[in-house]
Image (cartoon, rainbow, N blue to C red):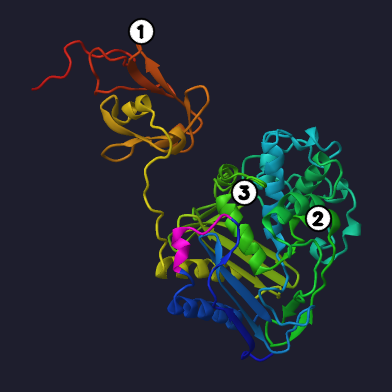
Amino acid sequence: MSAEPSDVREELGPEGELNGTGESEAGQFGALLPETRRALLRRLAVGQAEGRAPSLTGAVIRDGKVAWTASRSGSGSGSGGGAAGGVEVQYRIGSITKTFVAVLVLRLRDEGLLTLDDPLGKHVPGSAAPEVTVAQLLSHSSGLAAEARGPWWERTPGSLRQESGDLFEGDPRRLPAGRRFHYSNPGYALLGSLVERLRGGQPWDEVLRREVLEPLGMIRTTLRPQVPYADGWAVHPWADVLLPEPAQDTGLMSPAGQLWSTVEDLGRWAAFLVRGDDRVLSAATLAEMRAPSVPPEGTAWDGGFGLGFQLVRWNGRLLFGHTGSMPGFLASLWIDVAEDVAGVVLANCTSGPAVSAVAADLAGIVADREPRIPEPWSPLAGPLDEELLALTGPWYWGAHPYVLRLGAARALEISLLSGPGGRASRFRAEADGTWTGLDGYFAGERLRVVRSEDGSVSHLDVGTFVFTRGPYEPAGPVPGGVDAKGWRGR
């Protein structure tokens, strides 16, 4: 196979709308700069050439919109649709499928049909692993076997595994549940069965199409390939020759990695995963899903796993997303929330190209060369709550100076005014007049405004921590009291 490209296509037009939320001011600056586009195309080309991929297709999503797409193919590497790769061509996306299954499960949680602490057996009687929890399955901390029992499930028909009991050989547990990260493909097959059970026996992919794909406009994401789609290949390790790979219907294992998609559809997916969509899942729930759920393995503290998402640190940036592989295909999606940029790369070969590195680098190139322009500051909307405004400013936990700030929707933020450390958190307003911590030390804790008998504000109670207007005031409501003589000099 020639290393010279016979088909190089790059989309250089203006950014296209992906999520229907309207164009932000940062997006009004149009397409990427020519120098940035060339750097992106070169990175994709190097990935295709050095990885010896029949085709490599990539995209960058910025500010919730597709900012750039390109495809690079070698001669003689056609697809099932008669094209040699491209933004409209489907590739198998492997384990990126798991992110879709995770969203379906969190929809069930947000609807009140399950909790993350529920054991699987509560909802799926007769399951091969009834004691593991929904959260453990999502975060790969269930301790279940990494793979379904043989033969190799990715290359054999799903008819070989028709029931849950067919997924495992003997005891499905390899490690104690909830203790360590241990990637489990059958674990996501069980989650697919959970979705089907709680949706009245409907196939999980039909639930996905109706509840997620159609609302997000992802019409080119399907369980089985639709023309045009790329053929899957194996590339000989020591010669430039190809071998076709099978594309089996994996049946019960399909929630672990069977979906087909395009870079443009995955761009829509990336935009949703950052912003949310109330028709599908809220931004708050998606943020919960990308929080680390299990400790990292060994000494490699540069990666972890949330509820359905991989978490990595790449060149100093925090990314979330997922990688994928199936016989004949590789895929990667990485998202930088801080810069609101994502990279997607799809390849139609079993091994070779470093698609994860290329996708992360595509996002990094844009973030480095064209840093995100922040949203303009604007004053709070709506009538001003004078009592709430009066709470802002300095507060003291003992002698530690903190500051309380007011945000939109009556949100509060408390942070150390100066010095190292501190216990900063953001708080969401509740209907009962309290606030709930969203992050940091006080995540999940309550903030209450405590008043004196005359109605004036006495102090703030934040998870039993008492914050007063002055440091250790003698008459202040400080637990344990304050020395009656107060502060003194030498």
Residue ID for mark 2 = 253
| Residues at marks 3 and 2, CA–CA distance in whole angstroms | 28 Å
Comes first in the chain, label 2 or label 1: 2
Circle count: 3
Above/below status of 159 relative to 331: above
- Residue 306 seen in the figure: yes
Find residue 95 and report its image quarter: bottom right
Residue 277 badge: 3
Identify the magenta region. Answer: 21-29
Along the line of sight, the residue nearer the viewer: 308 or 265: 265
Question: What amino acid is at disc 1?
Answer: Glu
Which residue is drawn at the image coordinates 22% and 14% (left, top)?
474
Kindly indicate the quadrant of the structure image that contains residue 155.
bottom right
- Outermost residue on the top side: it is 453
Tell me if residue 25 is in the magenta stretch.
yes
- 95 horizontally vs 395: left or right: right
Residue type at the position of mark 3? Asp
Please name the amino acid that badge 2 sits on.
Met
Residue 233 lies left or right of residue 290; in this view the side is right
What x and y, as percent, mark residue 205? 80, 54
Residue 77 placement (x, y as % from top left): 73, 84
